[in-house]
Amino acid sequence: MENLRELSFEYAKVKSNELLANVIAQAYEDGYQDGYKARESELAVKLLDGETEYVDLGLPSGTLWSKNYEKEGNEFICLPYDMAKTYNIPTREQWDELYENCEWSFGYNYDNVSMMFCTGPNGNVIQFPVFGIKQPGGTVLKWRHCIFWLNNKMAVDLSKEGDEKNGHGYPNDKVATFHAEISELFPGYALPLRLIRNK
């Protein structure tokens, strides 16, 4: 009987930890969504008014990618997954096509913002500013990475390998030093919004 009590106690401890973790994660996600819900209608109008510039990169599928992340004024629009998925964000297949068919380089734009440039087979270019993950309170995680949502709860994490020694940007060299990781990310994180469109 004593053994049964011990086993029951251990089982209850594990289950209560899981329950607590789920409750905290849900509260964290709800906090993100509540912060953006107040502006949801405003964002929808902004994104659907034809201001987004799409670029034909000469991809085999003909998919057009937005030239940059969506902005409101000078600020990137960062959304948690449940809001981002209501827009036309890329699929995993569309991302794979982009990554495999384009050339990647690192540089700075005219505002001296570090970014990765993606040059399509036809020579046209789109930009991926290095931005990271926006957290509540303004903290940014992985600030030296380009991270954005795909439409299956996955995120692209595009980074430059070997940059950890250099605290002030990346060396400007070839695609071989780039690393793209696709992974499941906490859906409450606010990531910059990248849109695509079919021809």
Image (tube, helix red, strand yellow):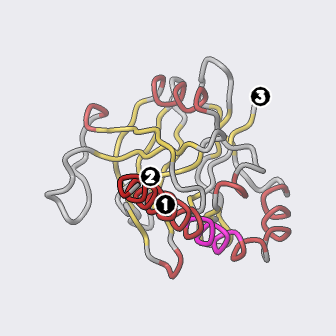
Question: Quick check: 17 left or right of 2?
Answer: right
Q: Nearer the viewer, mark 2 or mark 3?
A: 2
Residue 84, position in %: x, y? 69, 54
Q: Is residue 158 left or right of residue 150?
A: left
Write down the quadrant of residue 140 in the picture.
Answer: bottom left
Name the residue tied to disc 2. 146
Find residue 12 and name its label: 1
Q: Identify which residue is drawn at 85% across, 68% down.
A: 41
Residue at the image point whose x is 61% and y is 47% from the top: 67
Q: Nearer the viewer, residue 152 or 18?
A: 18
Residue bounds of the magenta highlight: 25-33
* Label whose residue precedes the other's in the sequence (2 or 3): 2
Q: Residue drawn at (58%, 58%), measured in percent from left and top?
A: 192
Estimate how packed mark 2 is, as few (under 14), some (14 to 19) or many (20 or more) residues with alpha carbons within 10 Å.
Answer: many
User: Of label 1 and label 3, which has the lower sequence position?
Assistant: 1
Q: Could you say whether the residue bearing mark 3 is in a helix, strand or loop? A: loop
Give yes or no for residue 116 being in the magenta stretch: no
